[in-house]
Image (spheres, helix red, strand yellow):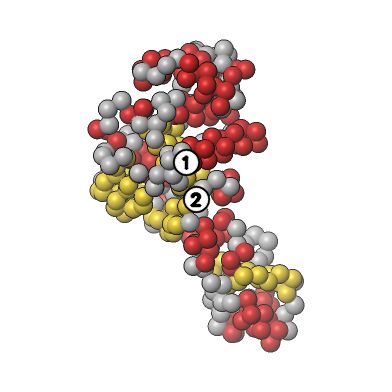
Amino acid sequence: MIRVEHLSKRYGDHRAVDDVSFTCEPGTVTGFLGPNGAGKSTTMRMICGLTQPSAGTSSVLGVPYGTIPNPGRHVGVLLDASARHPGRTGRETLTLAAMLLGVPRTRVDQVLEEVGLAAAARRRVGGYSFGMRQRLGIAQAVLGDPGVLILDEPSSGLDPEGIHQMRVLLRDFARRGGTVLLSSHLLFEVEAIADRYVMIAGGRIVAQGPKDELLRGRSGAVVRAGDPAALREALDRTGLEVRDTHADGSIVVGADPEQVGLAAARHGVALVELRGAEDLGLEELFLSLTGSQTAEEAKAR
C-alpha cells in the first residue's frame, strides 16, 4: 500500500503541494491526474524520499520509502526517463541494475521482451528515442519484481503499441496483487487502465475515487445551442448554475437535463446537444471539478 497523509511542499511563498492525502491499495492501479504544474511530480518525489516535505508524511509498504532496504526489490520507480547513461546499451543498463538489486541476469532478457526492447537491447541509450527511453525506464522499474510501482508520466512518448504493452503489463501486475500509482495529464490513456483516480489541481486534491463513484456524484447536464449567448441568457434567467464552458461551446450546468431542456424551451432556444453529466468523459469531469484551472492560475494562488 501507498499512504500519503497531509503532504505539503512550499517553495518560498508558493505552495506546490497543499495538504494532499490519498491511499493506493494492493491489486489496483491508481491514476494520479492533473495538468502540468499541478503538483503530481513533486508529490511523487516526496513519496520516494527525493524531496523533503514541508509538512505531512508518506509511506510505502507501511514504512517511509527511505527506510526500505534494497528498495528496488520492493518498489519500482520511474520519475525521469532520461536519467540513464547515454553511453551504455539498454542491456548493459539493465544488467548493471540487476547486479545492484541482486536479481538473476536472466530477468534482464525477460523484461526487455515485456517492454518491447529486445530488438534494441544492444543499441546505446543515447541513440534511443524518448519513447524507447520510457520503455527502458519501465523495464528497470519492474526488474526487481517489486510489489509496488510508482510511475511519473510513463506513457509520454510511447507509440500506440508501446501504450498497449504498458497497459497489459500494469494490469497484469495489479492482477497479481501489485500496487500501481501512475501520474498523467493524458486523461484518456489513464481511463483505459486505472481502477481509481486522484485528481489534483493547484497542489490540492479536488476529487478521488473510482470513476463510477466520481461520475455518480456529479449531477448536472452538458448542453449546447446554435446560439450560445441566448442559451446562457436562458440559463441565467432561470437561475441554473453554469459550471464550465468548453471550447466547442457546450456548457456544463448544475441541473438535471430535464430542467435545462425546459429552460431552453421556455425561452425559445434551440438545442443541438443535451446529455446528463454521467455521460461526461473523465477529462470533462476533471475540467468541471477544477473550473478549468490552468497550471499558471494554480501557481498564482
Q: Quadrant of residue 80?
A: top left
Q: Is residue 233 visible?
A: no
Q: In this image, 247 relative to 294: left or right?
A: right
Specify the amino acid type for callout 1: Ala
- Give the residue pinned by disc 1: 174
Quadrant of the snapshot with the N terminus: top left
First in sequence: mark 1 vs mark 2: 1
- Give the residue pinned by disc 2: 195
- Residue located at (56% from left, 27% from top): 115
Residue 279 image point, x, y percent: 62, 64
Q: Most extreme residue toward the front, as rendered? A: 176
Q: Quadrant of residue 264?
A: bottom right
Q: Most extreme residue toward the bottom, as rendered? A: 266
Q: In this image, 70 relative to 263: left or right?
A: left
Residue 105 image point, x, y percent: 45, 14
Asked if residue 205 is positioned above or below residue 113 in the image, the reply reads below
Specify the amino acid type for callout 2: Asp
Cα separation, mark 1 vs mark 2, equals: 10 Å
Residue 32 image point, x, y percent: 46, 47
Secondary structure beneath dot 2 equals loop
Asked if residue 144 is positioned above or below residue 177 in the image, the reply reads above
- Residue located at (32% from left, 34% from top): 50
Asked if residue 45 is positioned above or below residue 278 in the image, the reply reads above
Quadrant of the snapshot with the C terminus: bottom left
Residue 290 image point, x, y percent: 48, 60
Q: Is residue 196 visible?
A: yes
User: How many residues crowd around disc 2 within 10 Å: few (fewer than 14), some, or many (20 or more)?
Assistant: some
- Residue located at (68% from left, 71% from top): 274
Q: In this image, 286 relative to 75: left or right?
A: right
For the residue pair 111 and 16, the one nearer the viewer reads as: 111
- Residue located at (57% from left, 12% from top): 122
Q: Are marks 1 and 2 in contact (CB under 8 Å)?
A: yes
